[in-house]
């Protein structure tokens, strides 16, 4: 780990990652031991590793897998679900599975096509559905915290995009913890300070079987382009990604972001249909999308 000037053998590395995670959980006041945690798992290395780490640290963590119905010729959802279920069964962990097609009558690609959101890419509908379902299930099942496996590469890419666009509202919301409100669980990202390759090394050294393929729709996405750009920067200046993210968090914490909090803060109200907070007048974007696709075959 060039950014830390640290090299570890597999055995010590497998201790170091949970120790660091525990440090971040405490530093950012993510949750404590008596809270119920729901880990959003996709079958990928980050989310399965996060679940593994939290269980190793002794937290009460269950899993949530969202079956999105993405096939794209490689049976992506089927395989990621198989690996997630195998992970849970082998460790005797509780996994909740929410099948989007069974609940809403259509898979993510079908919802995207009918609602015509996202210019041929299902990602905008997918993001909307995932956010809504994670919030809904965490609330319905009484979890205090919703944990996701976002790593430093994910967070730095989002920060880069938000900075380029100077999206004040998103910049103010980005961070390791998003406080819960009005029945919404607190959202936390305990892996946000680990590089992606550190998480790959952890998953491999722990013998975690995960899906290697990215979702086929990720190909050519803006986030992958930003990740590649940041990787070039990181190669020339080791630690640049971490510094970029940590200095942002520090500037945000100390109120030095050059952003007017009053104008960037949006007004939220509960959606009259599902009850989740929304800035849209009337129904939230999720409920509007479902309404629009309801009568299509
Ligand atoms: S799962 Fe969904 Fe991602 Fe696939 S369809 Fe796009 S948003 S790329 S993280
Ligand atoms: Zn709604």
Image (spheres, rainbow, N blue to C red):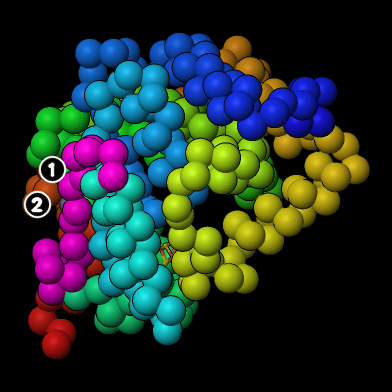
Residue under the point 19% across and 53% down: 97
Q: Which label belongs to residue 273?
A: 2
For the residue labelled by badge 2, is the local secondary structure a helix, a strand or a loop? loop
Mark 1 crowd level (few <14, some 14–19, many ≥20, 10 Å Cα):
some
Q: Nearer the viewer, residue 174 or 232?
A: 232
Is 85 situated above or below 294? above
Residue under the point 11% across and 36% down: 141
Residue under the point 50% across and 23% down: 18
Seen in the image, is 293 located left or right of residue 195? left
- The reply to whether the residue tagged 1 has its Cβ within 8 angstroms of ligand 2 is yes
Residue 36: image x %, image y %?
A: 21, 24
- The reply to whether the residue tagged 2 has its Cβ within 8 angstroms of ligand 2 is yes
Task: Inspect the magenta stretch and tell me whether residue 101 lies in it.
Answer: yes
Q: Nearer the viewer, residue 119 or 204?
A: 204
Find the magenta span and give its range: 90-105
Is 276 situated above or below 193? below
Q: Which label belongs to residue 12?
A: none
* Residue that numbered label 1 is attached to: 275
Seen in the image, is 285 located left or right of residue 2? left
Is 98 situated above or below 157? below
Residue under the point 55% across and 21% down: 15
Task: Inspect the magenta stretch and tell me whether residue 141 lies in it.
Answer: no
Seen in the image, is 249 located left or right of residue 97? right
């Amino acid at each position: 780990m060039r950014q830390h000037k640290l090299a570890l053998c597999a055995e010590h590395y497998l201790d170091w990652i949970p120790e660091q995670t525990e440090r971040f959980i405490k530093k950012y006041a993510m949750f404590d031991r008596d809270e119920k945690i729901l880990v959003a798992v996709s079958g990928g290395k980050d989310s399965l590793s996060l679940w593994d780490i939290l269980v190793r640290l002794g937290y009460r963590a269950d899993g949530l897998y969202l079956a999105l119905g993405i096939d794209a010729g490689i049976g992506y959802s089927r395989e990621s679900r198989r690996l997630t279920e195998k992970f849970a069964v082998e460790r005797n962990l509780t996994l909740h599975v929410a099948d989007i097609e069974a609940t809403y009558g259509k898979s993510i690609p079908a919802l995207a096509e009918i609602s015509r959101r996202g210019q041929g890419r299902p990602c905008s509908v997918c993001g909307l559905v995932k956010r809504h379902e994670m919030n809904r299930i965490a609330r319905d099942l009484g979890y205090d915290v919703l944990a996701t496996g976002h790593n430093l590469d994910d967070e730095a890419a989002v920060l880069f995009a938000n900075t380029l666009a100077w999206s004040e509202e998103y910049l103010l919301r980005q961070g390791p913890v998003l406080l819960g409100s009005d029945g919404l669980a607190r959202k936390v990202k305990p892996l946000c300070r680990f590089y992606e390759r550190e998480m790959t090394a952890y998953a491999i050294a722990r013998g975690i079987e995960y899906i290697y393929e990215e979702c086929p729709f990720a190909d050519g996405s803006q986030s992958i382009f930003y990740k590649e750009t940041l990787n070039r920067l990181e190669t020339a200046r080791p630690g640049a990604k971490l510094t970029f993210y940590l200095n942002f968090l520090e500037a945000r914490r100390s109120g030095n972001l050059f952003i007017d909090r009053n104008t960037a803060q949006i007004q939220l109200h509960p959606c009259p249909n599902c009850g989740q907070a929304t800035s849209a007048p009337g129904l939230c974007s999720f409920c509007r999308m479902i309404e629009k696709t309801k009568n299509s075959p």
